[in-house]
Image (cartoon, rainbow, N blue to C red):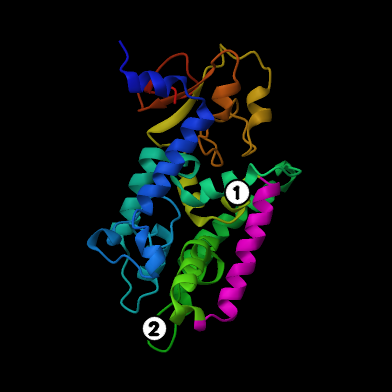
């Protein structure tokens, strides 16, 4: 017999379940909300722990550290040594969940989802697939190489992605701090203007295109994409149940054909394909146990 909470959860639509998880994740990663009103940062011990999604360290409410910002801070240090801690946490997140993090746990991903709900003409990104490689350029060059290669007089590199590109930094950090803190507000200059323009562009694009930042720019999404093929949480497609209706392919906003690849780098595990499949040929699973009916190794089935 199901418990009352289990019954309530089971009847909720997938979209609502996902929104609840996204909202809860955003709240947990930004739990110190009173700091927003004070214009100060939380600097407790837990701030050293990286959160899985893109969430700016400079956000007054931030609970933990942004993994991209933390990695750049380490590689840009004059006493640079490879960060096993940060890299290890990122690998752990990737092995456990892959790009499920992008689809369910990332605050900036949820922000784009909300923007896309605004009534406006929508455009497909299927003819813009080459742009997905930009995020790998961001990961390897802007995040990885530039802080090492371009340094100041004392050998310190800048966190180039956070400083010049990341719209989450200005949304969560720059704007709230400048509103609440007069000293910060008086020191704003060209860099704040540049980041504001980038944020506005991302907002406008997110209203017309589904998750443009995730698809084309985000280095964290690029990193997690390498783990979609091996993550413990994944999807399975049962070709024997498939009736080739094409609904899963048409509904996917990440331009993935799940019938061809259940481990595609761009799949954020949003569950839309599962929702529309008339024969339940697509399932979620956790683990690596083999099963004959599957197109890949699978474990215990459990739909979201």
Image mark for residue 155 = 2
From the viewer's perspective, is 168 left or right of 91? right
Q: Residue furthest left?
A: 45
Position of the N terminus, as image quadrant, is top left
Q: Position of residue 187 (x, y in %)?
A: 50, 83
Q: Position of residue 7 (x, y in %)?
A: 38, 18
Q: Is residue 9 visible?
A: yes
Q: Is residue 227 visible?
A: no
Are dots 1 and 2 in contact, CB under 8 Å?
A: no
Q: Residue furthest bottom?
A: 153
Image mark for residue 88 = none
- Looking at the rendering, which quadrant does residue 197 occupy? bottom right
Q: Main secondary structure of the magenta part?
A: helix
Crowd band around label 2 with a 10 angstrom C-alpha radius: few (<14), some (14–19), many (20+) = some
- Which residue has dot 1 on it? 215
- Looking at the rendering, which quadrant does residue 38 occupy? bottom left
Magenta region includes residue 199:
yes
Helix, strand or loop for disc 2: loop
Disc with the residue nearer the chain's start (1 vs 2): 2
- Looking at the rendering, which quadrant does residue 101 occupy? top left
User: Alpha-carbon distance for marks 1 and 2?
Assistant: 33 Å
Position of the C terminus, as image quadrant, is top left
For the record, the magenta segment spans: 186-209
Report the residue at 49% width, 37% height from top. Answer: 19
Q: Position of residue 243 (x, y in %)?
A: 64, 13
Crowd band around label 1 with a 10 angstrom C-alpha radius: few (<14), some (14–19), many (20+) = many
């Amino acid at each position: 017999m199901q418990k009352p909470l289990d019954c309530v959860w089971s009847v909720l639509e997938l979209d609502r379940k996902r929104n609840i998880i996204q909202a809860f994740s955003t709240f947990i990663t930004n739990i110190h909300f009173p700091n927003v009103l004070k214009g100060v940062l939380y600097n407790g011990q837990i701030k050293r722990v990286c959160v899985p999604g893109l969430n700016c360290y400079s956000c007054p409410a931030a609970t933990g550290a942004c993994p991209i910002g933390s990695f750049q801070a380490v590689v840009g240090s004059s006493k640079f040594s490879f960060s096993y801690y940060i890299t290890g946490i990122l690998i752990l997140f990737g092995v456990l969940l892959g790009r499920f993090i992008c689809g369910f746990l990332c605050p900036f991903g949820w922000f784009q989802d909300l923007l896309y709900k605004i009534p406006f003409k929508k455009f497909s990104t299927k003819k813009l697939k080459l742009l997905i490689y930009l995020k790998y350029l961001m990961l390897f060059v802007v995040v990885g190489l530039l802080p090492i290669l371009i340094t100041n007089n004392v050998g310190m590199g800048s966190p180039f992605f956070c400083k010049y590109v990341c719209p989450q930094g200005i949304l969560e950090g720059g704007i709230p701090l400048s509103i609440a803190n007069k000293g910060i507000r008086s020191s704003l200059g060209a860099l704040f203007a540049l980041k504001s323009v980038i944020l506005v562009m991302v907002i406008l694009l997110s209203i017309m295109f589904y998750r443009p930042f995730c698809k084309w720019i985000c280095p964290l999404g690029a990193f997690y994409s390498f783990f979609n093929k091996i993550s413990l949480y994944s999807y399975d497609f049962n070709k024997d149940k498939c009736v080739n209706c094409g609904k899963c392919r048409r509904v996917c906003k990440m331009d993935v054909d799940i019938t061809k690849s259940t481990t595609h780098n761009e799949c954020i595990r949003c569950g839309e394909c599962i929702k529309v499949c008339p024969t339940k040929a697509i399932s979620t699973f956790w683990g690596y146990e083999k099963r004959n009916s599957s197109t890949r190794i699978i474990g215990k089935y459990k739909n979201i």
